[in-house]
Amino acid sequence: MTNRSRIALALTAVAGGLVSASNADVIATLTYDSLSGSWDNGTGLFTAIAVDQGPNGLRSAGEASRIVATEGSASFNTGFTGRTTAAFSISLSAVATMDPNVKTGAGTFTATDTNGDTITGDIAGEWINLGNGFVVFNGAVANAFFNNVSQDGEFNGEGGSFFDMIFANGQGPYEGAAANLLFNAGSFFTSNFDKVSTGTLIQIVPTPGALALMGMGGLVAIRRRR
């Protein structure tokens, strides 16, 4: 099993709600691991970006897949940044609630392929402090677009991997669901941290239907147990 597969399974298990493609109208998934996550108290924003910090640091990898006909995947190998325009970034707020282990969050994500095409969207949901340095975000995606910037109609990865960006319902907007998992976060957004290993899983569906991806139970069950 690849590290990418492990992070996807971990995100699904811990977030407790993103269903498999076979059980929902998911048209595309984005899975990125070993992103560099940072929190800045001054701006009030969490950011995670794809990086190549060398053999002793974080080296991001990822895969964007179309899972409806005609299926295909764009793969980005370990340390893919720096070789092409390929990139991934996510930015989310973290706002306190009455529950010290729960914060609300909202922001955006951008996945960029080797030709400069992008997949973008808005995200809103909740951060949950799982303890022992583990933090998970589970939220809904809105206004997701497949942006055919290069006009080649493809979202391109490395080694000739790609998928067709033109869907039956057009290039957007779409909805979906997203989960982030932070490993060894220094705090629950109370003091600055950086270079925290972060995994991201995003599933995109035609509108309506995003709420079905969130599942029943999931984070609600986690919150009730605390």
Image (cartoon, grey):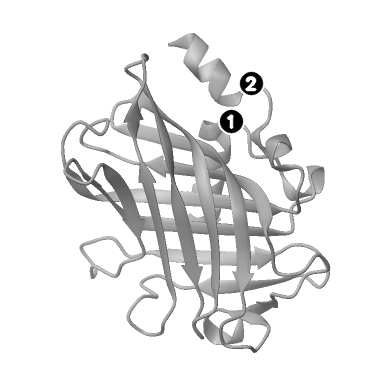
Labels 1 and 2 touching (C-beta < 8 A):
yes
Secondary element type, mark 2: loop
> In this view of the protein, can residue 2 be seen by the observer?
no
Q: Measuring 55% from the left and 85% from the top, which residue is drawn there? A: 159
- Per the rendering, the mark at residue 93 is none
Residue at the (73%, 36%) spot, across then down: 212
Q: Position of residue 211 (x, y in %)?
A: 69, 36
Query: As drawn, is 126 to the left or to the right of 63?
Result: left
Give the Cα distance between marks 1 and 2.
7 Å
Which residue is at a point 56% across and 34% down the rendered structure image?
A: 13
Q: Quadrant of the N terminus?
A: bottom right
Q: Which residue is mark 2?
A: 217
Rendered position, 146 above or below 181: below
The residue shown at (29%, 27%) is 132
For disc 1, the neighbor class at 10 Å (few under 14, some 14 to 19, many from 20) is many
Say which label, 1 or 2, has the lower sequence index.
1
Q: Nearer the viewer, residue 4 or 139?
A: 139
Residue 2 point in image, percent of width and height: 52, 59
224 above or below 200? above
Image quarter of the C terminus: top left
Q: Can you give x and y, in whole percent of width and height, for residue 104 in the image?
A: 42, 31
